[in-house]
Amino acid sequence: YVLKDNEFALDNLVSTVRRAISNRGTRVLVVDDLPSARRVLVELLEAQQFKVAEAGTGVEALAALDEYGDIEVVVTDHHMPDMDGYELTRRIRHRYGSDRMRVVGISSSNDRLLSAMFLKAGASDFIYRPFVAEELQCRIAHNVETLMQLKQLRAAAASDYLTGLYNRRYFYDHGPRIVNECLRHHRPTSVAILDIDHFKHLNDTYGHEIGDQVLKAVAGRLHSLFEGSENLLSRLGGEEFAILFTEMDSRAATALCDEVRVNLANLKVNADDEELSVTVSIGVAEIAGHEAFENYLNAADQFLYMAKHKGRNQVYS
Ligand code: GH3
Ligand code: MG
Ligand code: MG
Ligand code: MG
């Protein structure tokens, strides 16, 4: 028995430490009108390595969400003057989905329907007081875990497996939002489609694996060229990439694309004993009106076709 207990204790310690490490970046907001009750929660959470923020009212809580910007979990009391925890939960859910923000209700009320009310209002979890510290910590940890898994899923769904760039889905999902934002502020935007020249020939000559290596090298160079800029780069599929340029009309985007074209032509990819290089063709279209996003991509694709037709290794707009 003693041995078993020790084993359990050690197991517990290891998982506690592991959890504490993964909690480290997460900020939790504790909302309670009673300072002493708040203190207990804050100390328990800080012992778990969470970054903790505090609020004494619902209004303060909503302000804290804006002020910090990185709060991912809210633990809220129910009975509070002005705004109760149920109402606070509703308001938080109005602004943040449960995939971004977890809300955990907590109350010493003996109304057994309260937990159902909270859950219906969008709370992720509910704990009745008095609670066992371990239970609170486990429930919070599960919520943090769920958020982390969702984050990983979102990242996987947005990225292209071979190159690590944003994928087509992300481009078509976020592109229109960026365009609308730019149009609202009367900023010019343009879109470019870039396609590697004679890539089928490269595949046929050197094999698919070398082809993949070239794709990765081109993607890596594009990434480093656009890193830190507001422009959205993605791999549409195959040997085709798309770039959404903000703050750039067709003329500016075309000039920049020509620099990209020259830069890529100078890229050397080491494959087996050979140094390979490729050229690209690019079509550029300005987004000037309120047509569907696809229409502008089709226009860029038409221009890309012209660039190919005119002999490749060039930009057409
Ligand atoms: P063009 O200059 O007109 O663009 O000719 P192309 O040969 O580049 O164009 P085409 O569309 O005929 O061929 C594209 C090739 O890209 C065909 C396909 O086998 C290859 N490809 C598509 N996706 C991948 C990939 O993920 N890896 C590799 N290695 N090849 C791919
Ligand atoms: Mg209270
Ligand atoms: Mg192609
Ligand atoms: Mg091609």
Image: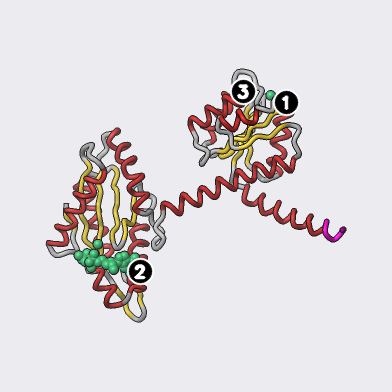
Res. 212 mark: 2
Task: Name the quadrant where ligand 1 sits.
Answer: bottom left
Nearer the N terminus, badge 1 or badge 3?
3
The amino acid sitting under disc 3 is Asp
Farthest residue, direction top: 82
From the top left corner, tell me how far across and down residue 207 is, in percent. Answer: 32, 76
Location of residue 219 with respect to 101 vertically, above or below: below
Tell me the element at label 3.
loop
Which residue position holds label 1? 110
Q: Which residues are magenta?
A: 1-5
Callout 2: helix, strand or loop?
helix
Mark 3 touches mark 2? (CB < 8 Å): no
In the figure, 38 relative to 218: above or below? above
Is disc 2 surrounded by few (<14), some (14 to 19) or many (20+) residues within 10 Å?
A: some
Check if residue 114 falls in the magenta segment.
no
The amino acid on which the numbered mark 1 sits, given as a three-letter code, is: Asn
Report whether residue 99 is seen: yes
Residue at left offset 13%, top offset 62%:
309
Q: Residue at coordinates 67% horizontally, 54% vertically from top-left? A: 18
